[in-house]
Amino acid sequence: GEARRAAVNSDGDLLEASVGVLSRESLEERLGAVERPIEFEPLEAMEPLQHAAAALTELVDEAAPPSTRPSDIPEAFLCPITFALMDDPVVMMDGMTYERRAIETWLSKGHTTSPLTGAELQSTMLIPNNLVRSQIREYRAQQ
């Protein structure tokens, strides 16, 4: 069957819309006509992917043992610009510690803002972070 309903648009004009109404039986009949069986891949089809993933994991472990990956290095020891373990950590006026070469490169390109916050730097003075440097040395000695 068909039902009619009235609606008003934003200008206040009366609109009329026609809506088709189907009974549950009619709807089920229409859906049944287009229903297709769901096909699933057999689990065996996943085996080559699982083997490939395992082989890739093995190669990554050989190239960079888990203990040397950045995820295993304390975040405070990683430069926020290069994401690498720092050799010469320095503190900037934004309060952050960076690898000296990375922040010097940033500043040499004419930047006058913090690479992390975007805030204007009051000074570009670099102060050695001796505490972080000694912690990194201890970390490396344990590896």
Image (spheres, helix red, strand yellow):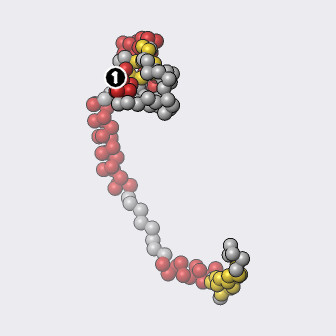
Residue 109 occupies which quadrant of the picture?
Answer: top left
Answer with the quarter of the image where residue 100 lies: top left
The foreground one among 129 and 47 is 129
Dot 1 falls on a residue whose secondary structure is helix
The image position of residue 68, as x and y in percent, is 35, 25
Kindly identify which residue carries mark 1: 101
Give the left or right position of residue 131, taking residue 104 as reference: right
Q: Quadrant of the N terminus?
A: bottom right
Give the image location of residue 60, x and y in percent.
Answer: 30, 34
Out of 23 and 40, give the one closest to the viewer.
Answer: 23
Q: Where's residue 34, x and y in %?
A: 48, 78
- Number of numbered discs overlaid on the protein picture: 1
User: Does 129 sit above or below residue 52?
Assistant: above
Q: Residue at x 38, y 22 (%)?
A: 99
Residue 64 vs 47, above or below: the answer is above
Whether residue 118 is visible to the viewer of this picture, yes or no, is yes
Name the residue type under label 1: Arg
- Residue farthest to the bottom? 1
Instruction: Quadrant for the C terminus, please.
Output: top left
Q: Residues within 10 Å of mark 1 (few under 14, many from 20)?
A: some
Closest to the observer, 66 or 35: 66
Residue visible at 35% across and 18% down in the picture: 87
Can the viewer see residue 139? no
> In terms of image quadrants, where is residue 54?
top left
What residue sits 37% from the left and 17% below the top?
88
Left or right of residue 113, residue 82 in this image: left
